Amino acid sequence: MKDPAEFDVQRVRSLAVDFYDRDPRRVARELLGKVLVRRLGHERMAGRVVEVEAYLGTGDAAAHAAAGLTPRNRVLFGPPGRSYVYFIYGNYYCLNVSCLPDGVAGGVLFRALEPLAGMRAMARNRGLPEELTEHGSRLLTTGPGRLCEAMKITRARDNDLDMTSPASGVWIGDDGYRPQRVAVTRRIGITKAAGHPLRYIIAGNRFVSGPKGKEGLSFFRRAKRDGRI
């Protein structure tokens, strides 16, 4: 599978720091449809954000910040718009962006991307054939560990980068795309505070890593009715 011929990374415009200086729930929803760009040497890789989860800081039992400020999670307490990368299960990296003002913890986890550019490089990085089928392309960046592996994102190299700057190795921008339908569900892959409706997806997108739309909309309606959102 080739990169979409019409996509041009040059037309992506970075997001300002103020975009991230807000409640992680608002940031998460508005990140859907934005473009995550990876610059590694002469290579450019990019993917559209189709699935994220919000983490609300020290009051959120599932958030890394729940334990308070530590050397490991200090980025979450720092300025907004910084990359927070952590290692999980002894195998995978996960990418987040910090939210809220300096000194207040909060962040958004990137769970899945729709590949846009640099797909051959992503396939090599994941140990997949460069000539991907439509089905195979879904294996590139569907899931937080996969997307970091595809883009060679690591904690040692990419933690605490300015994600508002195209000069960074990892940054986020806007190319004018707007999702037609957004769904909200409970977060997945966690046990603490698992019932909160803090996972945001582009409904129906085939690159989403979990339930893709109908289930999320139903859950959102129930949560709103019960006063949880």
Image: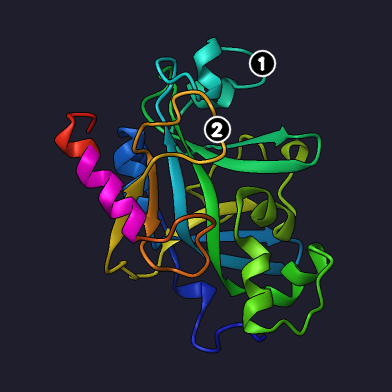
Q: Which residues are magenta?
A: 214-222
> Which structural element holds mark 2?
loop
Residue 14, given in percent of the width and then of the height, sits at: 43, 57
| Amino acid of disc 1 | Pro
Q: How is the image coloured?
A: rainbow
Residue 117, image quadrant? bottom right
Image-based side of 155 in relation to 99, left or right: right
Residue at (81% x, 71% y) in the render: 128
Image-based side of 215 in relation to 129, left or right: left
Q: As rendered, which of 33 and 61 lies closer to the eye?
A: 61
Instruction: Tell me the residue that label 2 is attached to.
Output: 190
| Amino acid of disc 2 | Ile
Residue at (64% x, 78% y) in the render: 135
> Which structural element holds mark 1?
loop
Q: Main secondary structure of the magenta part?
A: helix
Residue 189 is at least partly visible in this image: yes
Q: Earlier in the sequence, mark 2 or mark 1?
A: 1
Above-or-below relation of 75 to 129? above
Q: Is residue 221 magenta?
A: yes
